Amino acid sequence: MNKFFTTRAFISGLLLSILVAIIDHYSIDIVHGSYMAIDHMPAGAIFIFFFLVFIINTLLKRINPKIAFSPGELLLVYIMMLVASSVTEMGFGSQILPIISAPLYYSTAENQWDKLIIPHLKKFLIVTDKKAVTYFFEGLPKGEPIPWSAWIKPLSVWLPFIFILYFVMVCISSILRKQWMEKEKLVYPLTILPREMVKEDGKGFLPCFFKNPLMWLGFSIAFIIGTINAFHNYFEAIPAVKLVHSIPIFRRTTNLIFRISFPVIGFVYFVNLDVSFSLWFFNLLFKIIRGTFNIMGISSTENVGTYGCAGEPIFSHIGMGAMVAMVLYSLWISRGHLKEVWRGATGEKVDDNKEILSYKSAFWGLVFGSLFLTGWLTISGMAWYIALLFLIFAFIIWIVLTRVVCEGGIPTLVATTIASSQIISAFGSKNLTPLTLVALGLTYVYAADLRTFPLASSSMGLKIGEEAKGNKRILFWAIMGAIVINIISTIFIELKLAYKYGGINLNSWYFIGGPQRPYKYIAEMIKLHSSPNGIGWLCRAIGFFLMGGILFMRQQFLWWPFHPIGFVIAPVWLMDQLWFSIFIVWLVKKLILRYGGAQIYEKLKYFFLGLPLGLYTCAGIWFIIDLFTGKQENVIFWI
């Protein structure tokens, strides 16, 4: 792959990383439209990339082929936008400002945060200027300047922690790259679309991807349906195309959802059949178990917070146990590679030329970065051993989700639980000081809404840049540069929009619902004074041994049809939404391979790649239209 790391590609990547933030925040905060950077396959980045490759670069080729971007340069730009998208919205950017200002704004006599929360908050971590906080949520009076100084102190403490955290994630992705790509040969389905979009056949100005009629057929189906629904939002007389239906089951105690998700259908087409089968099978199995529990009155009254995403604490704890087993198994089968990493870290000569960081830099970056993170969390109020345990749990969850993304191709994904809730459940709130509990609540800034994060995006970026020639180390600086520039841009944009329009008039979840959740949860835990949850410990053990059994059977018997990643994320609410789309594409792919063979499968891949591209492009175009017309709530893409 020629000309991957060039100055103009790097600068273009930085500028477009800023554009990602602008498009996303104007879409969710001003237009209240599609979520453009919410997932592991960000709609906004794909829309910009489509515009760059299909229109701008084609025009440059027509003017003078020498000034056009090469495929390698385009992919570097995309990698930077991909990583930037993971921190601009749900991953971090939409979380931090509202959460660190919410205690002062949302504190009332009824919720008693002035007694339960605020006294235990380290003041250097939150905004303490009452007027600055009020104006942030309600908008500035006319003529008042933005109080930038009120935010400088807390952000100057938060940002070093966040940058080191994401640096550690990049170190981990570098350490895991060879094991996952070369030894285990994971598919990385979400990287196929951008790589296909830039492939050239040397004939004409367009990449061959855009010459394929099957791609345009898939593109048109998703684009037309999205456009019809957009027109329906403008003119109610135009009927909408419903892509989701549900039926009540188990005496109406739960619903079975049938949703058509074009991105999921498009990407899961490239997933191995045993993986896609396990994804929908285990979700239905957990649905049956949940429904049976509902009828029999079996439930847990434990509060595991908003982000116990399995819908039932029992399943959240089972999921945590399963994730621990999965990571331990991954470390075991990676032991040969990890020994090579250790040799490189201790100064022995090893082959790490393909890595974006030498094994020595990645290993010691992970070690010293983790020590810094532990120290910072301790200063924030956690006991040192809780800080360490929190990081272990958090990285277990991040690594498992990254593995599922890279192997399972699910663009829209969360875990069954989060680290802070697991610690509170395991120890009991009565055994944790209020300082520790409140500090755990602050982790919601970066470790609660786990639909996207840099460990997954940087891992996919390494796959996209796998064939790049030259010094791979430059890709590390491209990834970190995209993270830093996007976070700075996002904070600036968020402050400008909030003070201009009032945060409570922007995205309601990020400014009203979301910022209150950690403090409501922690306040309840402080008042509850709970003991360690025995049922939780039992369920973690059950999840651990069930996952161990699945891993053992898969390792020992070729006929074993169940893949572990299906089990580990099966109970989450997003899988309830997406199981039907996964089932459809699993069935279609199975029939194609049985009756058409590998050749037909290869030809039809363009149709399936066209589905997500068509929907993301539709979402981007209608965002621009809505921005000019002033139309709101015209959501084309969510999952």
Image (tube, rainbow, N blue to C red):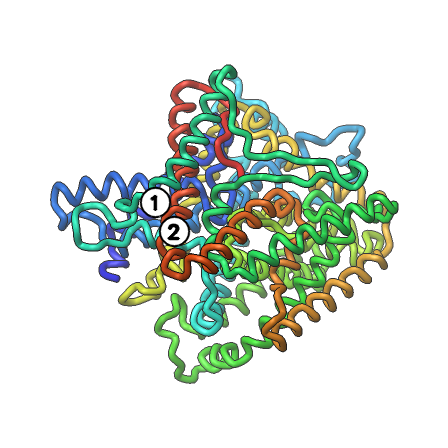
Give the mark, 2 or 1, whose residue is nearer the N terminus: 1
Question: SS at mark 1?
Answer: helix
Q: Residue at x 73, y 66 (%)?
A: 546
User: Which residue is under mark 1?
Assistant: 214
Residue 362, given in percent of the width and then of the height, sits at 46, 69
User: What's under tag 1, amino acid-wise?
Assistant: Leu
Residue 577, given in percent of the width and then of the height, sits at 61, 42
Residue 597, given in percent of the width and then of the height, sits at 41, 61
User: Which residue is under mark 2?
Assistant: 604
Q: Which mark is residue 292?
A: none
Q: Can residue 379 be seen in this snapshot?
A: no
How many residues crowd around disc 1 within 10 Å: few (fewer than 14), some, or many (20 or more)? some
In contact (CB < 8 Å): disc 2 and disc 1: yes
Q: Can residue 96 be seen in this snapshot?
A: yes
How many residues crowd around disc 2 within 10 Å: few (fewer than 14), some, or many (20 or more)? some
Q: Residue at x 53, y 57 (%)?
A: 408
Question: SS at mark 2?
Answer: helix
Residue 538, given in percent of the width and then of the height, sits at 82, 62
